[in-house]
Image (tube, rainbow, N blue to C red):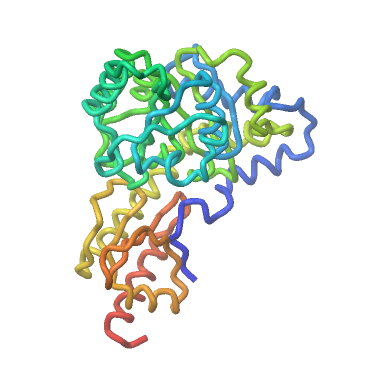
């Protein structure tokens, strides 16, 4: 079996597992008040260049998005996101469950356009009936996007400027942030993100940890009693040291960036495998998610051969867009084995 369905099919990086085992019998205080959590926060502050940053650890991405958005919106406000955004499509209505609407804008290869955001906000306040409508209260983007695409620094700055103009906090979902930062095609650093957003999170679940996301308020202005709101959303881990140990390890000796780079290098190999066999790509992704247009007949053969991938959307009656993901744990040998299998299936020898 070869599993390219996602970037969280493995457990965690061996250094994290070793750290969890090494500290397993230590007695620490709960709810993230332990020394490992404090050390992890210090390391992250140093990496982003913001000593004033407030940092909180939650367990999963949907929890994180829901908690951050709900804590920052007033009861009559919604969150602006692109129509393909994770909070709009793949979170089972978690945002709406809290009483807030996702206000969807067009997506451009998964990205938000600053000009369209500005036009939307201007149109809302120009409507004489806007008091009867859901107010835009904040903006949500992800980097990388759902399609593995990336914002440029200029694009991020343009969105940030529009957010400041309309007093809309900017929230960046970084579930796969490491893979975006280590892409060869990016000009965005983690320091840039800390400078241009009001809140973002550093994903651990998809980047080498068993679980965990680090929420960062870079300006040190987290909502009042944010820990209480984390608990209200069922997202406060009693054994908070588990997240602390993991992120302390990830941000020791640049491990987070080193393992993210592996995913990008393997993704480059994966792209070459498909390109050399004349497969077309749904769109160009510079990160670890690759979207391939494949014949349904070939997909049936891959299924029989035990290759796991993600179905994305139909391309036409005979083709489907599928996603192949690499991760921090993907090996060059796995990519080579996929290439060998594709050749055998295409030749009919298997």
Give residue 286's position: percent from left, percent from top.
Answer: 28, 46
Image: 70 above or below 262: above
Name the residue nearer the viewer: 17 or 54.
54
Name the residue nearer the viewer: 39 or 69.
69
Image: 301 above or below 239: below
Instruction: Judge left or right: residue 288 versus residue 120.
Output: right
- Residue 110 is drawn in which quadrant? top left
* Outermost residue toward the bottom in this view: 349
- At horizontal 43% and vertical 40% (from top left) the residue drawn is 88
- At horizontal 54% and vertical 35% (from top left) the residue drawn is 213
- At horizontal 45% and vertical 66% (from top left) the residue drawn is 308
Would residue 181 be visible to someone looking at this image?
Answer: no
Name the residue nearer the viewer: 225 or 349.
225
Image: 2 above or below 300: above
Instruction: Judge left or right: residue 248 versus residue 338.
Output: right
Give residue 288's position: percent from left, percent from top.
Answer: 36, 50
- Residue 5 is drawn in which quadrant? bottom left
Q: How many marks?
A: 0
Give residue 190's position: percent from left, percent from top.
Answer: 38, 27
Would residue 59 be visible to someone looking at this image?
Answer: yes
Give residue 21's position: percent from left, percent from top.
Answer: 70, 44
Instruction: Judge left or right: residue 339 versus residue 72.
Output: left
* Quarter of the figure that contains the C terminus: bottom left
Instruction: Judge left or right: residue 25 versus residue 202.
Output: right
Name the residue nearer the viewer: 285 or 294.
294
Image: 106 above or below 196: below
């Amino acid at each position: 079996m070869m599993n390219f369905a996602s970037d969280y099919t493995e457990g965690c990086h061996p250094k994290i597992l070793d750290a969890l085992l090494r500290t397993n019998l230590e007695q620490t205080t709960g709810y993230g008040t332990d020394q490992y959590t404090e050390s992890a926060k210090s390391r992250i502050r140093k990496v982003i260049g913001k000593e004033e940053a407030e940092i909180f650890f939650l367990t999963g991405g949907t929890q994180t998005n829901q908690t951050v958005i709900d804590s920052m919106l007033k009861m009559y406000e919604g969150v602006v996101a692109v129509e393909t955004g994770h909070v709009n499509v793949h979170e089972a209505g978690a945002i709406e469950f809290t009483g807030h609407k996702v206000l969807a804008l067009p997506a451009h290869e998964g990205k938000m356009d600053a000009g369209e955001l500005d036009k939307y906000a201007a149109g809302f306040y120009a409507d004489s009936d806007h008091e009867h409508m859901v107010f835009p209260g904040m903006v949500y983007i992800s980097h990388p996007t759902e399609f593995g695409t990336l914002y440029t620094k200029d694009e991020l700055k343009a969105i940030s400027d529009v957010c400041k103009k309309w007093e809309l906090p900017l929230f960046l979902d970084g579930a796969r942030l490491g893979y975006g930062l280590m892409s060869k095609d990016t000009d965005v650093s983690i320091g840039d993100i800390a400078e241009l957003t009001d809140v973002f999170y550093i994903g651990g679940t998809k980047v080498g940890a068993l679980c965990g996301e680090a929420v960062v308020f870079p300006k040190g202005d987290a909502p009042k009693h944010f820990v209480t709101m984390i608990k209200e959303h069922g997202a406060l881990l009693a054994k908070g040291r588990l997240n602390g140990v993991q992120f302390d390890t990830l941000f020791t000796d640049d491990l987070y960036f080193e393992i993210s780079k592996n995913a990008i290098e393997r993704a480059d190999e994966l792209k070459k495998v498909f390109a050399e066999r004349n497969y077309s790509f749904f769109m160009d992704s510079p990160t670890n998610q690759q979207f391939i247009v494949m014949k349904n007949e070939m997909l049936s053969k891959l299924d029989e051969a035990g290759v796991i991938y993600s179905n994305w959307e139909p391309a036409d009656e005979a083709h489907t867009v599928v996603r192949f993901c690499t991760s921090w744990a993907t090996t060059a040998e796995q990519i080579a084995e996929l290439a060998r299998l594709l050749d055998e299936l295409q030749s009919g020898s298997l």
